[in-house]
Image (tube, rainbow, N blue to C red):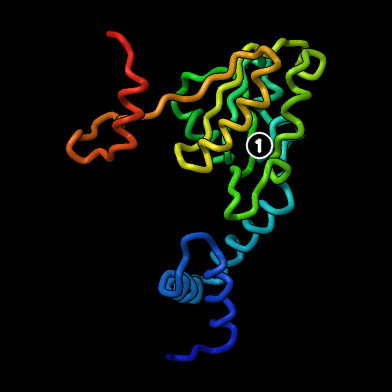
Amino acid sequence: MLEYAEPVTKLIDEFKRLPSIGQKSAQRLAFHIMRMPEAEVERLVLAMREVKQRIILCSVCNNHTELDPCRFCSSPTRDHGVICVVEEPHSLVAVEKTRSFKGVYHVLHGSLSPIRHIGPSDLHLANLLPRLKPENNEGVQVTEIILATNPTTEGEATANYIGRLLKPLGLRVTRIAMGMPVGSDLEYVDEVTMDKSLANRHEI
């Protein structure tokens, strides 16, 4: 195998630590960095340093934010009576893109996974229950919890666990619908997706 200079090897090894980055992708990124002008590299380094120094977790919903509480939790125009539970901050962004959800969020930063030894205590669940009391929620009574975890085995397990946790409290707990994506062809849909689509059918 071709051996690179030690600084290059170190850079490649660091890139390989990133999600979905293999040996070849890491090499391409490393050589791209070496071709970049010094000023661009400095901007990249500064951006990475700033995101580590300035971004914190919202003390209310656990979203990434520069100010605590975050802009969703501190907004007087959001419906604090409806909380949408998502796995990761980027899932929150996906919900926001619809421009139809006007409630607030709770970010778990993961999902239950016995294989990866991730249990309930490893998720950001501890500060969800206190939010259900009006005195901890801008004086607003929570009326619904929407479980918007991913449609994976781990996401389903997480939704079921939270559902069992919240149901005794008399709250309305809902799960986002899953099934056929818009614009897809029935011919290429797997049986699990088709089963969900039939189960979640609605009257027209």
The answer to which quarter of the image holds residue 85 is top right
Outermost right residue: 135
Residue at image location 60% in from the left, 55% down from the top:
116
Side of 204 where 107 appears, left or right = right
Q: Quadrant of the C terminus?
A: top left
Above or below, 79 against 196 in this view is above
Residue at image location 76% in from the left, 34% down from the top:
126
Q: Say which amino acid is labelled 1.
A: Asn
Packing grade of label 1 (10 A; few <14, some 14-19, many >=20) is many
Side of 94 where 69 appears, left or right = right
The residue that label 1 is drawn on is 63
Residue at image location 64% in from the left, 30% down from the top:
106
Question: Residue 8 in the image: x percent, y percent?
Answer: 54, 82
Side of 188 where 200 appears, left or right = right
Above or below, 107 against 75 in this view is below
Question: Residue 171 in the image: x percent, y percent?
Answer: 65, 14
Side of 196 where 58 appears, left or right = right
Q: Quadrant of the N terminus?
A: bottom left
Q: Nearer the viewer, residue 42 or 3?
A: 3
Question: Residue 65 in the image: x percent, y percent?
Answer: 68, 38
Identify the element where label 1 is drawn: loop
The answer to which quarter of the image holds residue 184 is top left
Residue 77 visible in the picture: no
Residue 102 visible in the picture: yes
Q: Nearer the viewer, residue 128 or 8?
A: 128
Above or below, 36 against 113 in this view is below
Outermost left residue: 187
